[in-house]
Amino acid sequence: MRRSFLVVLILVLLPAVLPAEQIALGPFGSFIDPPEGWGILGQESEKLTFAFSGEGAYLQIKRFPGFSGLDALVSETEGRLGAEGEGTRFSYASGEAYFGTVDFRTGGFSFSGYLFAFTDPSSGLDPVVLLGFSDSEQLGAYNDLILSAMDSYSPLALTDRLPGPVASFDRLFSGGRRSSVEIAVAGTRKTVRLDQGEVETASYVTEREARILGAAGSVAAWERFFRVLYRDSVAGLEPLTLALHEIFPRNPSAREAREIAEELLVWLQSFTYRRSGTFSDFVDPVQAVVSSSGDCDSLGLLYVILLHSFDIDAILLVSEKYAHALGAVDVSGGGARYTHAGKAYVVAELTDQVDLGLIAADMADPAGWTPIVFPNNLTDRNE
């Protein structure tokens, strides 16, 4: 099997394979959360290189201190590689971004992949370029893994709660069509207009991540799956959270937080139970709201996102043993609780019309549940 030029240049150094977790990037950005199997291959003052296990795919993050201008940044990168590519520039958070394809040759080998460039002079972050690629003949095999890794990058704290670079790029071509959704929460009716393009792109992200999860299947991979969908959903649900902030106090007291958790639970319990029937068999949170339907996983994740919008701490509980998922919320009052990281969370059953804190006796063993924590939520950042 032929070796890539990167391996030759670094004298066949093997990457330190990382678990599926968020990695703080320091001067290279806020964080990256690549799929299981990626590892750090090398680090220099202005370049960080990752490789997938087996060295079939690569991801480089390069910063350009003192550089200005997005077009010049892309031209410099493509020129340095002798690459051909095409893409689109777009606004991303408070900065400007570019995403496109790239093809280049080096060391007698052909490589293909994707380029993301980002610049925001007001942020203090150096202009940065992400280059994800593989041998051109192998791109189809590594496409999901490369795009997922690039999509997990967050250049700024401001983008931690925005869809990733790839999903944001995709939304350029699917947004604009809005669906009106009637909600009835705590005796109040509201009309919420959600972007139908959010549903289309979220479905793409969900299916991509499900394919990656199916190949991994570890607990850490499951945790990452929900982290990715959480991040991808928050911005698309903003019209709904703003409507809910008109119904409930934005900064609730302990008593009000319990009431919010109870009322949101009652509303989501009224949704029709439905699974998507796709490979993922998962209804993403935005689609769940548009269709007023979902299963335990999708409604549990939606519940957590909505509670986080009020700075109410909540986690998702998933169980392979029980083939089920629950919400769990850190509020006062009675009910069955799940203890994690020193907090006792009240459990929330989303697919049966029972009160907050009630759980079926045959699912009550805490050892049967795995907590899914979302480290980029507002609650964690305020602690």
Image: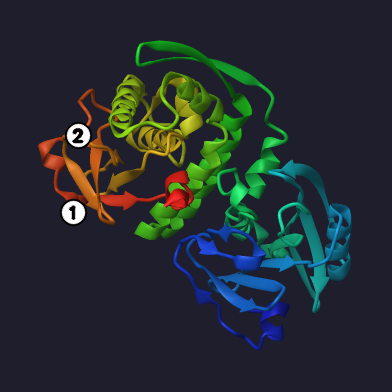
Relative depth, front residue between 140 and 63: 63
Cα separation, mark 2 vs mark 1, equals 23 Å
Q: Quadrant of residue 15?
A: bottom right
Q: Where residue 297 sits: x, y (%)?
A: 36, 38
Rendering colour mode: rainbow
Q: Amino acid at mark 2?
A: Gly
In this rendering, the label closer to the viewer, 2 or 1? 2
Residue 367 is tagged as 1
Relative depth, front residue between 167 and 124: 124
Whether residue 28 can be seen here = yes
Relative depth, front residue between 254 and 40: 254
Q: Going 34% across and 32% down the picture, which residue do you hit?
A: 253
Q: Amino acid at mark 1?
A: Ala
Q: Is residue 31 left or right of residue 345?
A: right
Tell me the SS state at disc 2: loop
Q: Where residue 41 sits: x, y (%)?
A: 60, 77
Quick one: label 2 or label 1, which is nearer the N terminus?
Answer: 2
At label 1, counting other C-alpha atoms closer than 10 Å, the crowd grade (few under 14, some 14-19, many 20 or more) is few
Tell me the SS state at disc 1: helix
At label 2, counting other C-alpha atoms closer than 10 Å, the crowd grade (few under 14, some 14-19, many 20 or more) is few
Q: Where residue 183 sits: x, y (%)?
A: 44, 15
**Does residue 69 lie above or below 274 as drawn?**
below
| Residue projecting furthest to the bottom | 11
Residue identifier under label 2: 333
Q: Going 65% across and 72% down the picture, which residue do you hit?
A: 49
Q: Going 50% across and 30% down the picture, which residue do you hit?
A: 286
